[in-house]
Image (cartoon, rainbow, N blue to C red):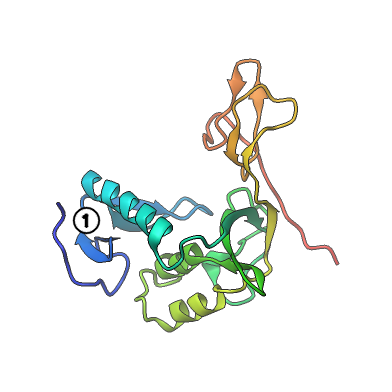
Amino acid sequence: MATEVDEPKILAERTAFVGGRWLEGGDPFPVENPADESTVTELAATPPDEVRRAIAEARRSFDEGVWAGLPARDVYGVRVAKSELGYKSLGASSEKVTKAQHCRAEVYLTRFGWVPVDPADVRKVVLEEPPGNRPLNDEMVTSARQRLFGSWEMNWMAYNFAQDVELPGSGGPTLPFLMYPQAQTVEGTLDSLDPDNFKYEITAKELS
């Protein structure tokens, strides 16, 4: 059982949030910037028993919490342009967007329809916006949290929100989601997350 600790001032402190409590984390592991593979920061690994408890708590909250029954879905896409809001971490840095895939979330609210929410991008602002490891009460972080709940900057293009995807003409397994390019040979399906054996390039250009 991990030791309970005080709420951290920055996310880079080696802690984990499980079941409403901040816990002391384990050994650190690097977090890489997908744009250039540089190490942004280090986060703490959570002990296996706490991971299992976190999953159980999330399931309980999903079934019984205040948000229980709220329809939600993932939307898969790619960032295609730089951020005009000044966030270096939330936009493409060049026309090459091969590593700019991003999954957003939406929830369905009565009278409003599908509403975007994006806590993952708020976390990117915390960890990756210079100088890095910004406090949770930092002005840029709070601005991103407010801006990205209910809307998103239109420098991202959605592909789909499908799950359990069966590719036409494919003899391979059903895909849990479709965000990365897929390829098959006579030997089977290639691993789309293995850059040494499956290479591709995605580019984006603004049309006037």
Point out the residue furthest to the bottom here: 139
Q: Quadrant of residue 173?
A: top right
Q: Nearer the viewer, residue 33 or 111?
A: 111
- What secondary structure is found at the residue carrying circle 1? loop
State the quadrant of the C terminus.
Answer: bottom right
In the image, is residue 204 above or below residue 12?
above
Residue 13 on image: x %, y %: 26, 65
Q: Quadrant of residue 94?
A: bottom right
- Name which residue lies at 35% across and 55% down: 60
Q: Nearer the viewer, residue 128 or 158?
A: 158
Left or right of 139: which side holds 47? left
Left or right of 117: which side holds 96? right
Residue 67 on image: x %, y %: 46, 66
Q: Quadrant of residue 153?
A: bottom right
Mark 1, residue position: 25
Tell me which amino acid carries mark 1: Gly
Can I make out residue 116 in this image?
yes
Point out the residue furthest to the right here: 208
Residue 203 on image: x %, y %: 71, 51
- Name which residue lies at 37% across and 74% down: 134
